Image: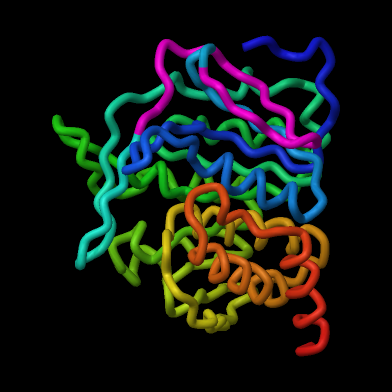
Amino acid sequence: MNLPATIEKPDYVVIGHITQDITPEGLTPGGTVLYSGLTAHAMGMKIGILSAIKPDFELDLPAGVQLHIKNSDVTSRFKNVQTSSGRMQYIYQKASDLLAADVPDTWLGAKIVHLGPVACEVDPAILSRFKNAVKCVTPQGWMRGWDADGLIVYKKWQDYQDTLSHANIASFSIEDVQYDEDVIEQIAGCIPVLAVTEAQNGARVYWNGDIRRFRAPQMEEIDVTGAGDIFAAAFFTRYQQTRNPWEAARLATKLASGSITRRGLHSIPTRKEIQNHKIEIIEEI
């Protein structure tokens, strides 16, 4: 894959592995960086995606989304299996790790930087390279280990205090921490703004010692893949625009809820959907 000679400064930089997801329809592109990056793009941001993939990986991205690749022998490959007790995930191969030195210098003036690991592949030290950005994390990939068969299991995030001391805002699902309220409270105490999504129950947001809950509209569930990443990008982007996490959470909850009615990357919200929900939020306020 050929990189452009000059890389334009993006508004929103998202860093992590683009994945190949094994589905009944075959291999499809996935990963936090795609779902979040394309959502932020739909919200009007210029996007920079830093990832590690095999050079022959084929991917079509819209104008306004730049891809900076660290060549890897493989592309990370996952399989998601929905069960009555929740989602089971498998990882079958992992691409190269992403380090602070891999970030293009021309990207360091971005408005938002979002670390979105899926398999412990992102160096948290990347945050220190961005001096003026809103620094965002979706830490699910730092909470994952896997066994010899590739089955992903929960792993306690050991260095969360150090990482979060360099961040402004975080988002993860209650499932990511195995519904452990003690872990949620510990993380909430280390960062100014935290969103915890709870599937069909919506989300809760911690800010300035206060907690507010946001109910999700009931939707027909087709595919939940990427819903948390869509929530996160909408939440981070709207927060950067307004500095109001309550408004950001209202918008993000509605967009993530709508996303589960579509499959794969078709779940990315449209600009019309985003605008309609923004108007609803203004009327509610």
Examine the image and state in which quarter residue 142 appears: top left
Q: Name the foreground residue: 203 vs 260.
A: 260
> Residue, x 70% and y 69% (percent of image)?
248
The answer to whether residue 30 is visible is yes
Tell me if 57 is positioned left or right of 208 in this view: left
Q: Indicate the position of residue 185 as horizontal and vertical percent values.
A: 42, 69
Residue positioned most to the left = 148
Tell me if 196 is positioned left or right of 68 in this view: left
Q: Indicate the position of residue 75 as horizontal and vertical percent values.
A: 43, 22
The answer to whether residue 154 is visible is no
Examine the image and state in which quarter residue 213 appears: bottom right
- The magenta stretch is 57-77
Q: Name the foreground residue: 17 vs 78.
A: 78
64 inside magenta stretch:
yes
Picture colour scheme: rainbow
> Residue, x 29% and y 34% (percent of image)?
91
Relative height, residue 96 to residue 34 (above, below): above
Q: Indicate the position of residue 278 as horizontal and vertical percent values.
A: 78, 73
122 inside magenta stretch:
no
Relative height, residue 280 to residue 108 (above, below): below
> Residue, x 26% and y 40% (percent of image)?
90
